[in-house]
Amino acid sequence: MPLTQDQINRLKKIAATGSISLAIILCIIKIVGVFYTGSLAVLSSMVDSLSDIFASLVTFIAIRISVRPASCSYRYGYGKAEALSALFQAAFIAGSGAFILYDAFMRLQNPTPLHQTDIGLAIMIISLLATLVLVAFQQYVAKITKSQAISADSLHYSVDILTNLSIIISLVIVHFWQIVWIDTLMAAAISIYLIYNAYKLALDASGLLLDKELSEDIRQSIYAIVKKHPLSPKIHDLRTRNLGGIYMFEFHLELDGNLDLYTAHRYTDEIEALIRGVYPDAQIIIHQDPAGIKEDRLDNQLV
């Protein structure tokens, strides 16, 4: 049974609040870890947690804005606020990665011994387990709500799972074999991975802001849904976009030119109902065309 919009918004807020709370807790315990171990890898994870706090706050604010109903000034709603928050997160992640990469380069030139790696290991294992729980919940929420902000936040913490694992491995190596440079190398690898993920995140957010077409699977599903109508009409000039978790479909519907306006309107309403049966919250704009009319179509203009 599909969730109501209020239930979806509530899930988004819970996920965002949980993200902020965990980021603050992890940042505090990682500061303790850096103090006791002097590990650059642990420091990189702590800086990442600081960026998570900022990013999660941005996500929380974006979600509060995105769930507002459409207004006279913003008739498409505020859903794209989530994409803006994803861009902020991408910039912050990239900045964090660049900071750690620079620090790793300096540490390679001046190696620093590590201390009390057992404390560092305990802290990173706790961080790993807590992050696993959060990511599982965020992915569940993102799947149900189609929220790009929650999805971006989940990506954040999915990266954290990998970084925490890599840091645990590096601390084990340092603890048992005293290979100190592995800590610096791991920190550099983490920073490069952060920058790469920031790029992907920015690319997805930019696509939403620039009204990139939805996936080909969704586009083909619209053609298939319209074909289910008893008239089995054709459509052309289909345009789709994501308004921030709510899909918008626009197309021209080809109908018998001899139909009266009321009948054509009824058929159009029936097709809208079919589409909303699959995409309940979709915004749909249908332009009615007489079948067989010769015109300069958008489908023929696009490359």
Image (spheres, grey):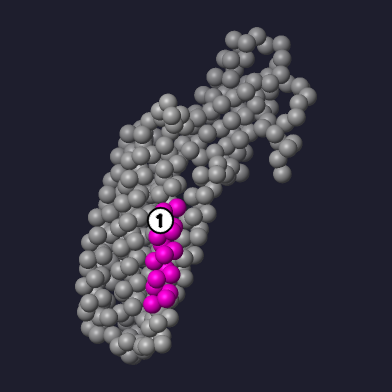
Residue 185 in percent (x, y) is at 42, 81
- Name the residue at 45% across, 52% down: 87
- Name the residue at 70% across, 34% down: 298
Question: What secondary structure is the magenta-colored segment mainly?
Answer: helix
Image quarter of the C terminus: top right
Residue 35 in percent (x, y) is at 22, 77
- Name the residue at 62% across, 29% down: 251
Image quarter of the N terminus: top left
Q: Taking the image as drawn, is residue 5 in sight?
A: yes
Q: Is 153 in the magenta?
A: no
On the picture, is 56 further left or further right than 244? left
Residue 216 in percent (x, y) is at 61, 44
The residue positioned farthest toward the right in the image shown: 294
Highlighted magenta segment, given as a residue range: 87-103
How busy is the neighbourhood of tag 1: few (under 14 within 10 Å), some, or many (20 plus)? many
- From the image, tell me which residue sits under label 1: 89
The vertical placement of 71 against 302, above or below, is above
The part of the image, by quadrant, that contains residue 96 is bottom left
Residue 234 in percent (x, y) is at 68, 27
Per the image, label 1 sits on a secondary structure element best described as: helix
Q: Nearer the viewer, residue 207 or 131?
A: 207
Q: Taking the image as drawn, is residue 232 in sight?
A: no
- Name the residue at 43% across, 58% down: 91
Q: Nearer the viewer, residue 208 or 2?
A: 208
Q: Nearer the viewer, residue 24 or 103?
A: 103
Task: Count how many numbered circles sit on residues in the image.
Answer: 1
The vertical placement of 243 against 137, above or below, is above
The vertical placement of 95 against 279, above or below, is below
Q: Is 95 in the magenta?
A: yes
Residue kind at label 1, given as amino acid type: Gln
